[in-house]
Every structure is written in structure tokens, then in C-alpha cells.
């Protein structure tokens, strides 16, 4: 059994980890930390876990995380970098769902996240946890930087085209929407029901911290300079993410070959579904599951390819992807504990 600890188990990604890991046949939940909720049974805060999780939250100073095999950090940015060095030194593997180790450029991290990086010695070692693109490295890793939710959709949508050298890498556009749970489980005016419901808005248009993360990862697959315009939006739903991606084709290719490119790229991927050409994937087709769906379009048969990508921002966009990485790190089947069918309606 894999002994698992979770730091920060009271947020949306934390409870999603608990939901997935409590049903994982190879996992033993060992510690769940929360300074504020120390001593509170997990099932008292999250009744959905009654009968599945019998642990209580414990403050970080009481939880002996060094006895775990792996520790997930479902915490604000900056927490993992403070605690990861000691855990790694004790032989514990670490999966960070925040951004502490996503950017290899320390200066870029400090610019976008407005904090000093206190564990720069670990930045280069950290493996970016996108299994479809980094599977072999993830298997050997002891420190995983779980990707952002938006970047997951953008990378899996653009990468096959970049690898094939078919598009202008300098003019990529991503028009993305996320449910309100992407903002986290905290009290803020912008995410109050009366503010977010019956409303739709863009944010971070002048610059968003997921742009440097995505651009840096996409740059690995092209010699061209990557240029990405990324505009996120908040939509009035709890879960779900939809990215509409635009790229200009620079080589002749017919629609059948374009479709075959994506089908070949993801043929053996358990959590990427390439739908028939011209399909319109819906966010609810992935709700509660670790599945990501992709569909291709080519308006008027022109030189623009449109890639539609949907996922559950809390599962494939966060906790599910982290569990997928854990499975790879410990040599168990990659889809173990992640075979939930999406909820409908």
C-alpha cells in the first residue's frame, strides 16, 4: 500500500484528492493536515466522505508526514517549497498542486507569483506532471510539479501540431473558460453566488501567470519562438473548463490527416479522447472524471485550425492528474482509482 499524506485538505483540490484516493485500492490515507481544523474529523467537514475517510485533520506540527511514501500539497503557492526539502531528504516523494516548481526560470516565478523562491535547488529537479507528454520522467521522479488546469488544455491541444511543424508557433491563441471552483474554496466577493451566477467575464487579459508556464512547456516542441495570447474567463458553473484554441497552419494538410495526427498522438492515452472531426465537446461530458476531450475544426477549409478542449478543472485539471502521476511514480496501473465515468446531467 502507498501511504499518502495531504497537506491542505480543506480546499476544493484537497477534497477532490480525498474523494479519489479514498477509493484507490493501493492507497492508505495516513495524514491530512489543516492548522485551523486540527482534530476535526474529515467526514464532519465533508459529509460526502462519511464511511470512506475516518481520519481527522491534524495540524502540520502534529502530522508525521515523514512516515508517508508520498505527500500531496493542495496548498497556496509557497507552502510546498518551504516543506518539500525536508520531506525529500526523508525519502518521501512530493506532488505539488500549486505553482512552486512549475517554472524553471526562478526570476519568472518570482515576477508572476510575487514571492521569493526559497528552494531554488529543487527547481531543476522537479518534473512537470503532464503524463501524456512526460510519462517516462514522471516514473523516475521524486518531486512533481502538477500542471495548472488551463495549461493542461492548451498543451494537449497545441502540442501535436507543434511537434509536426504544421503551425505558426508565434501566433497561438487560447480563449479559455473555467467554472468558479477554479478560484479555490475561499470567501471572495467575485466568487459569491450573487456575483458569479448569471454573469460572464474575462480576467487576467493583460497577463496571466499560466501564460509563462504554458509557453515554456510548448517551447520544448518547436524551434520557433512561441507566442501565446491567453485569455481566461469565469463562467457561472461550479466545475468544468473549455478552451478554444486557434493556430494558423503553415503547411498543406487535409482534414483527414489532421484528424489522424491527433488520433495517433493520443491513441494509447487512457484519459484523452479525440472525438470525430467537427465535434463539439461539452464540459459536462467530463464532469467528475479524469477525461479530457479534444475536437478539431477548420472553418471554411482555410488555414486556421480550431481545437476545442474540455476537462473537469478539479480532476484532470488538478487532483486527478496528480493521482495519475502518483500511479506512475509507484508503478501501479496509470488508470487505477481514476476510472470514474463523467456525471450526467
Image (spheres, rainbow, N blue to C red):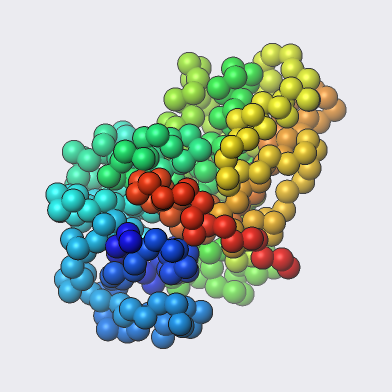
Residue 85 in sight here: yes
User: Is 14 placed above or below 323 here?
Assistant: below
User: Is 321 placed above or below 196 here?
Assistant: above
Across and down, in percent, residue 316 comes to 53, 52
Q: Quadrant location of residue 259?
A: top right
Q: In the picture provided, is 193 more to the left or to the right than 189?
A: right
Across and down, in percent, residue 311 comes to 60, 52
Query: Which residue is rendered at x = 32% and y = 84% of the image?
Result: 40
Q: In the picture provided, is 303 more to the left or to the right than 67?
A: right
Query: Which residue is rendered at x = 23% and y = 45% of the image?
Result: 117
Extreme residue toward the top, this view: 251
Extreme residue toward the right, this view: 300
- How many numbered discs, if any? 0
Q: In the picture provided, is 116 more to the left or to the right than 9?
A: left
Across and down, in percent, residue 74 comes to 37, 61
Query: Which residue is rendered at x = 26% and y = 57% of the image?
Result: 69
User: Is 264 placed above or below 38 here?
Assistant: above
Q: Quadrant of the N terminus?
A: bottom left
Q: Quadrant of the C terminus?
A: bottom right
Q: In the picture provided, is 197 more to the left or to the right than 29?
A: right
Query: Which residue is rendered at x = 46% and y = 49% of the image?
Result: 333
Across and down, in percent, residue 209 comes to 43, 44
Residue 169 in sight here: no
User: Is 127 placed above or below 80 here?
Assistant: above
Amino acid at each position: 500500500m502507498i501511504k499518502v499524506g495531504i497537506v491542505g485538505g480543506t480546499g476544493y483540490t484537497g477534497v477532490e484528492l480525498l474523494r479519489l484516493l479514498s477509493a484507490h485500492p493501493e492507497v492508505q490515507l495516513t495524514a491530512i493536515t489543516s492548522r485551523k481544523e486540527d482534530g476535526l474529523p474529515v467526514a464532519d467537514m465533508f459529509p460526502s466522505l462519511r464511511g470512506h475517510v475516518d481520519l481527522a485533520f491534524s495540524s502540520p506540527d502534529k502530522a508525521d508526514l515523514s512516515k508517508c511514501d508520498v505527500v500531496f500539497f493542495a496548498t497556496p503557492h509557497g507552502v510546498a517549497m518551504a516543506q518539500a526539502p525536508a520531506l525529500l531528504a526523508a525519502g518521501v516523494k512530493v506532488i505539488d498542486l500549486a505553482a512552486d516548481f512549475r517554472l524553471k526560470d526562478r526570476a519568472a516565478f518570482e515576477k508572476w507569483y510575487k514571492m521569493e523562491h526559497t528552494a531554488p535547488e529543487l527547481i531543476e529537479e522537479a518534473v512537470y506532471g503532464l503524463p501524456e507528454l512526460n510519462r517516462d520522467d514522471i516514473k523516475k521522479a521524486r518531486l512533481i510539479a502538477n500542471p495548472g488546469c488551463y495549461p493542461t488544455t492548451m498543451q494537449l491541444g497545441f502540442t501535436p501540431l507543434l511537434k509536426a511543424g504544421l503551425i505558426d508557433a508565434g501566433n497561438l491563441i487560447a480563449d479559455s473558460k473555467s467554472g468558479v471552483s477554479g478560484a479555490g474554496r475561499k470567501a471572495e466577493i467575485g466568487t459569491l453566488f450573487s456575483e458569479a451566477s448569471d454573469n460572464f467575464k474575462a480576467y487576467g487579459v493583460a497577463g496571466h501567470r499560466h501564460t509563462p508556464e504554458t509557453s515554456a512547456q510548448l517551447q520544448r516542441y518547436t524551434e520557433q519562438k512561441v507566442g501565446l495570447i491567453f485569455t481566461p474567463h469565469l463562467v457561472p458553473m461550479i466545475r468544468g473548463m473549455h478552451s478554444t484554441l486557434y493556430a494558423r497552419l503553415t503547411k498543406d494538410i487535409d482534414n483527414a490527416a489532421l484528424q489522424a495526427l491527433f488520433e495517433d498522438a493520443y491513441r494509447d492515452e487512457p484519459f484523452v479522447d479525440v472525438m470525430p472531426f467537427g465535434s463539439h465537446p461539452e464540459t459536462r461530458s467530463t464532469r467528475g472524471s479524469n477525461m479530457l476531450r479534444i475536437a478539431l475544426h477548420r472553418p471554411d477549409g482555410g488555414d486556421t485550425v480550431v481545437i476545442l478542449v474540455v476537462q473537469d478543472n478539479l480532476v484532470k485539471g488538478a487532483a486527478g492528474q496528480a493521482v495519475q502521476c502518483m500511479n506512475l511514480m509507484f508503478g501501479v496501473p496509470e488508470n487505477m482509482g481514476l476510472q470514474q465515468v463523467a456525471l450526467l446531467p
